[in-house]
Image: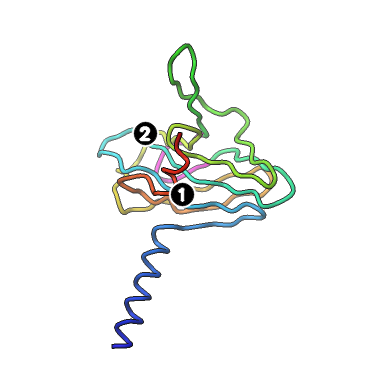
């Protein structure tokens, strides 16, 4: 009975780890990179994450790349002339010291152009983030049917 209990505990721990994944480079801590599942043939997608800067120096997310898409760019949603539009963030995204940059649906995000494979629920793909000071960091982006609970809390 004890072995079954230990096995169940280990499976639950692995399950929690699979859902919430974190990365570290320098003073930057990256929480749960994810994207929404997209129908087959969708040409674009978007990746979301939170970058916490636990250091005393500001940094900047310059961009990203992935073998899953032709290109990835930092984009933001803006209200212009009464319409919601999307545009590339020129010069990258500032990550102030002691603060966080939230990439979320309806806000700043990593736009993925020319998807090379379907974004299917339950899969993952590599994404390399390029930071001005901290350098490059490869993360795994979790493809999910719905936004994770933490991301829903950030939405406006």
Is residue 68 magenta-colored? Answer: yes
Which residue matches tag 1?
33
Mark toward the start of the polypeptide (1 vs 2):
1
Is 76 situated left or right of 122 in this image?
A: right
In percent of width and height, residue 78 lies at 50, 23
Extent of the magenta region:
64-73
150 or 97: nearer the viewer? 150
Residue beneath the point at 35% across and 42% down:
36
Q: Element type at marker 1?
A: strand
Q: Is residue 62 magenta?
A: no
Q: Residue furthest right?
A: 56
Q: Nearer the viewer, residue 45 or 12?
A: 12
Q: Which residue is mark 2?
A: 44
Seen as rendered, the residue at the extreme left is 40
Residue at point 45%, 53% (across, down): 140
Q: Residue furthest top?
A: 81
Residue 23 vertical position relative to residue 58 in the rendered view, above or below: below
Comparing 74 with 30, the one in front is 30
Does 118 sit left or right of 132 as displayed?
left
Q: Position of residue 93 (x, y in %)?
A: 60, 35
């Amino acid at each position: 009975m004890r072995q079954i209990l230990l096995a169940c505990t280990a499976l639950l721990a692995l399950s929690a780890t699979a859902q919430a994944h974190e990365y570290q480079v320098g003073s930057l801590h990256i929480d749960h990179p994810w994207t929404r599942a997209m129908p087959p043939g969708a040409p674009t997608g978007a990746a979301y994450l939170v970058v916490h800067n636990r250091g005393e120096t500001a940094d900047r997310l310059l961009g990203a790349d992935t073998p899953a898409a032709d290109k990835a760019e930092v984009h933001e949603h803006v209200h212009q002339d009464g319409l919601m539009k999307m545009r590339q963030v020129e010069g990258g995204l500032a990550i102030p010291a002691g603060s966080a940059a939230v990439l979320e649906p309806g806000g700043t995000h990593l736009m993925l152009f020319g998807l090379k494979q379907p974004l299917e629920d339950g899969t993952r793909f590599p994404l390399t983030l390029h930071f001005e000071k901290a350098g490059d960091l490869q993360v795994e982006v979790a493809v999910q049917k719905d936004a994770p609970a933490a991301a829903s809390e950030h939405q406006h």
